[in-house]
Image (cartoon, rainbow, N blue to C red):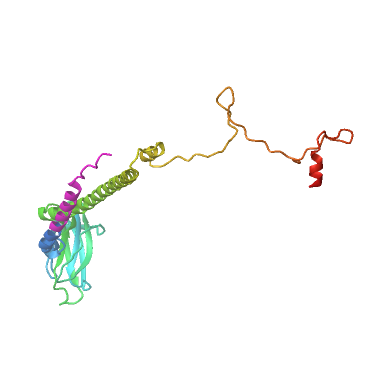
Amino acid sequence: MQASSEPSQWPKRLMIAGLIMGFLGVVSFSVFIEDFNDYNDPREMAEHSAEFGQVNMLTLTSGCWVVNIEGDDSNYDIEYEVIENGEPVGNVDEDCRSDFQAQAVDVDFSRVTTLKISKTTEVLVTISCQESDGCANKVLFTNGESVLIEILGDVGFLATLGTCCLGAVIFPLGWILVTINKNKQNKVHLTQEEVVASVSAQDHEFQNNRELLTTDQLYKLVRGEMPEFEQKNDDNVPSPFATDTRPKPAQKRTGSIYQASTHTPENPPTDESWKSWDES
């Protein structure tokens, strides 16, 4: 049997590379986490703002605009009107979907509504407050599509995300390949050990006997086991010769061993041996 080939080292290298990439991704994320949090903060990402008590004329580009207020928005009543040629022509559509979620560590935000803008539009924002001193915070307008584009253009964010994902793929792949190679190597070693043990046992038996091997021993050495034959004792095997010279077994005699006498009163014996027998 040929010896097993040396297993490849690439699976282990892949597993180590995946582990290193995952570690670098975690470190990079911990370093840039504050910059990543800014993408969800309307105070940093809002393109426009409106205040109570002022005339707020905003130019909104196409997209889904998310309106947020820092803190509670229960005192705010806000209207959004489309302006064309200096005159209001109708309200802005307020039902669109955006993945932008306002989050910050130091403050909570209230989501007022979303504005659907199909093209660049002039919008008049009118703020009414139920309490005179209850609407001090600004109304922030954030374009969710612009935030997404800015995130995808961040090299640090993409590098961190790519490193983490690549490490999460390479490490399990390397581990699977290492496991497969290990199982194959174990099978080959087990077979070799069995062959060596079998040959050693036969060699030991040969040395103990110190004589030429018989046909049965040679067969057992090569095949590892002896065939099973059904033994039948058949004495009625015909002779290979034309004249059967083998001694025949004596036939069993039956009946009495004594034979009837041939002497009768008419035919008495000629000698007198009977007298000696009679006198005895």
Give coordinates of residue 275: x percent, y percent.
82, 42
**Which quarter of the figure has residue 44?**
bottom left
Count up the numbered dots.
0
The reply to whether the magenta stretch includes residue 3 is yes
Looking at the picture, tell me which residue is in the foreground, 61 or 203.
203
Residue 217 magenta-drawn? no
Q: Position of residue 118 (x, y in %)?
A: 20, 51
The answer to whether one can see residue 61 in this image is: no
Q: Is residue 228 above or below residue 119?
A: above
Q: Looking at this rendering, what residue extends furthest in the right direction?
A: 266
Quadrant location of the N terminus? top left
Question: Magenta part of the protein: which range?
Answer: 1-24
Instruction: Decide if residue 27 is on the left or right side of residue 101.
Output: left
Asked if one can make out residue 138 in the rendered structure from this viewpoint, the answer is yes
Q: Is residue 200 left or right of residue 118?
A: right
Q: Nearer the viewer, residue 167 or 195?
A: 195
Q: Residue furthest top?
A: 242
The percent coordinates of residue 191 (x first, y second) are 31, 45
Q: Is residue 222 left or right of residue 231?
A: left
Nearer to us in this view, 211 or 229: 211
Q: Quadrant of residue 164?
A: bottom left
- Label the magenta part by its dominant secondary structure: helix
Residue at 12%, 60% (x, y): give it. 27
Out of 126 and 7, give the one closest to the viewer. Answer: 7
The answer to whether residue 30 is above or below residue 202 is below
Coordinates of residue 23 in the picture (x, y in percent): 14, 58
Residue at the spot 81% in from the left edge and 45% down from the top edge: 278
Name which residue lies at 21% across and 50% down.
174
